[in-house]
Image (cartoon, rainbow, N blue to C red):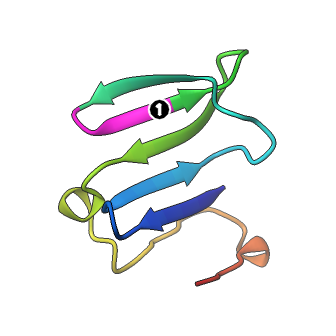
Amino acid sequence: MKFHYYPETDSLYIELAEDHTGTDSLEVADGVVIDSDEQGTLVGIDIDHASKVTDLSQLNVAGLPRSRFHFSR
């Protein structure tokens, strides 16, 4: 899973599956779009105006193995 933030559009894309390409998109709430692949598997979530929806200054993670965390800028 990867989080991609684009400050120029204030959008946050949560990539759930690196090896799958989204072929279908569905807006499930105002400014929230989910992407799925050809099999209907959820592959990503796009959030417009992300800084207005959530606090982007911190990322809290619960219950995930910490040995596999990678941070990049």
What amino acid does circle 1 point to?
Ile
Report the residue at 68% width, 24% height from top. 37
Q: Locate residue 60 relative to residue 57 in the image: left or right.
A: right
- In this view, the residue in front, 63 or 8, is 8
Label 1: which residue?
34
Where is residue 44, by image quadrant?
A: top right
Image coordinates of residue 5 in percent, x first then y, are: 45, 66
- 73 lies above or below 14: below
Where is residue 35, by image quadrant?
A: top right
Q: Locate residue 62 relative to residue 12 in the image: left or right.
A: right
Report the residue at 75% width, 48% height from top. 18
- 65 lies above or below 12: below
- 21 lies above or below 13: above
Q: Does the magenta-highlighted stretch encompass residue 17?
A: no
Q: Residue furthest left?
A: 52
Q: Residue furthest front?
A: 8
For disc 1, the neighbor class at 10 Å (few under 14, some 14 to 19, many from 20) is some
Characterize the magenta stretch by its predominant secondary structure. strand
- Position of the C terminus, as image quadrant, is bottom right
Count of all numbered marks drawn on residues in the image: 1
Q: Locate residue 35 relative to residue 29 in the image: left or right.
A: right
Image coordinates of residue 39 in percent, x first then y, are: 73, 15
Image coordinates of residue 42 in percent, x first then y, are: 61, 30
Report the residue at 21% width, 34% height from top. 30
- Position of the N terminus, as image quadrant, is bottom right
Residue range highlighted in magenta: 30-34
- 59 lies above or below 64: below
Helix, strand or loop at disc 1?
strand
- In this view, the residue in front, 6 or 69, is 6
